[in-house]
Amino acid sequence: MRLFLVGLAAGLALLAGCDRERVAQLEEGVATEADVRAQFGKPEAIYDDEDGSRTLEYPRQPEGQRNYMITIGPDGRMSALRQVLQPAVFAQVTPGLDKVQVRRLLGRPGKTQVFPLKNEEVWDWRYLDGPENRVFSVSFDPDGKVIDTASSLDPRETQGGG
């Protein structure tokens, strides 16, 4: 098991390193959608924005700790590249938002769970907060509206494994 965990950690470090290299290849205002796709591949989802721009979603969940939202402006050039799994974005997830709005903010979650007795669904994203591995959770009511959020240490860290 220990060897597996060491291998998994090495693989995750490689993925993070690859993303850094991909990001470094893209310059805001210069890179095109074709450049973004050449670096990141096919997006998980594409969101059309009111101003004519498009946002491409590149999640790294469930094992990664980043999700990228890359915006292509109406001129066809990249206008923003954001790693969205961070406290400032989590603060935008407030009671009353629906699942579509949360997905648009944070990208695909790493894990979803349904709790029938509580009549809730919970989505989790793994992320880094400084040196700490953490999980951000969003609880939804039966209508798919946010009722609560929480952040905690990643249980895989505190329980010693997956």
Image: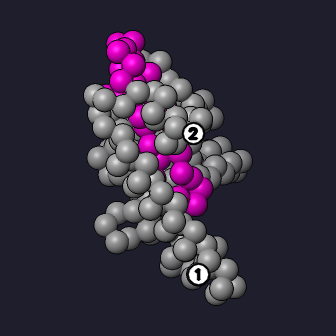
The amino acid type found where label 2 is placed reads Gly
The answer to whether residue 102 of the structure is visible from this angle is: no
Screen quadrant of the N terminus: bottom right
Q: Count of labels shown?
A: 2
Residue 115, percent from left and from top: 67, 51
Pick the residue in front: 22 or 113: 22
Work out whether 129 lies above or below 42. below
- List the single residue furthest toward the bottom: 2
Residue named by callout 1: 6
Work out whether 51 lies above or below 3. above
Q: Residue at x 49, y 28 (%)?
A: 34
Q: Residue at x 45, y 33 (%)?
A: 35
Tag shown at residue 41: 2
- Circle 2 residues within 10 Å: few <14, some 14–19, many ≥20: few
Q: Earlier in the sequence, mark 1 or mark 2?
A: 1
Pick the residue in front: 115 or 132: 132
Tag shown at residue 108: none
Q: What separation in Å lies between label 1 and label 2 (alpha carbons)?
A: 27 Å
Magenta run includes residue 73: yes
Screen quadrant of the C terminus: bottom right
Q: Are marks 1 and 2 in contact (CB under 8 Å)?
A: no
Residue 47, percent from left and from top: 50, 24
Secondary structure under tag 2 reads: loop
Residue 72 position by quadrant = top left
The amino acid type found where label 1 is placed reads Val
Q: Is residue 129 left or right of residue 121?
A: left
Residue 108, percent from left and from top: 56, 42
Q: Which residues are magenta?
A: 50-79
Residue 2, percent from left and from top: 64, 87
Magenta run includes residue 10: no
Q: Residue at x 56, y 35 (%)?
A: 43
Pick the residue in front: 129 or 70: 70
